[in-house]
Amino acid sequence: ALPICIAMALPNGKVTYRNIHLPTREKKAIASGVKFELEDELPMDSDTIQFDSAVVKQDRAGSDVYVAATTRGHIVQLLEEMQPMGVDPDLITSEGWAFRGFFNRVLTPDLQEHPVLLVHIGHESTILYLHHQSRPVFTKELNWGGKDINLAICQKYQIPIEQAEGAKLDH
């Protein structure tokens, strides 16, 4: 039997992202530089922050680093929500990093020369993810989704919500 690995992504609304340029290529200097940059940029107390980073590009001028940060409380909440279902994830990532992995698998390098925008419209929220040259440029969650489209159709055409959902799917 193959081993099972469970990976989960924190929702974009619970993660903040930064693209940071550091004038170094050394691993230890990058780690301390990311921590220093986050202390000034994030509106959270540094004692409550959990973050991870990845070098997405290096050249003579230094390193471009992608950083995802959240509060430890968001991670604890996710784990507590999964516990009654018997789910204990081996990996917790962010939606932005998951989208990066997806695009880097399905898009050839020449297709990544121009920015690619993913718009994922969910029921109550919409995720925007901008990908360029193998890395995330921007990711944002909007509090607007398919439910809001249904309500707009209801109001415009004075029809019930069920009929609006059908009209949205048909057209």
Image: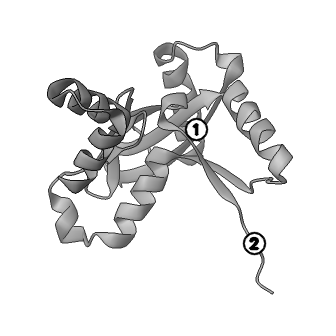
Front disc: 2 or 1: 2
142 left or right, relative to 156: right
Instruction: Using the image as rendered, state which of residue 160 and residue 41 is in the foreground.
Output: 160
Q: Residue at x 53, y 43 (%)?
A: 53
Tell me which label, 2 or 1, sits earlier in the chain.
Answer: 2
Q: Which mark is residue 4?
A: 2
- List the residue tagged with mark 1: 31
Q: Amino acid at mark 1?
A: Ala
The correct choice, above or below, for 124 with respect to 132 in the image is above
| Nearest the eye: 20 or 16 | 16
Against 40, residue 117 (above or below) is below
Looking at the rendered structure, which numbered label has been put on residue 59? none
Q: Given contact means CB atoms under 8 Å apart, are the residues at marks 2 and 1 in contact?
A: no
Circle 1 SS class: helix
| 62 left or right, relative to 113 | right
Eyeballing the image, is 69 above or below 93?
Answer: above
CA–CA distance in space, label 2 to label 1: 31 Å
| Residue 75 visible in the picture | yes
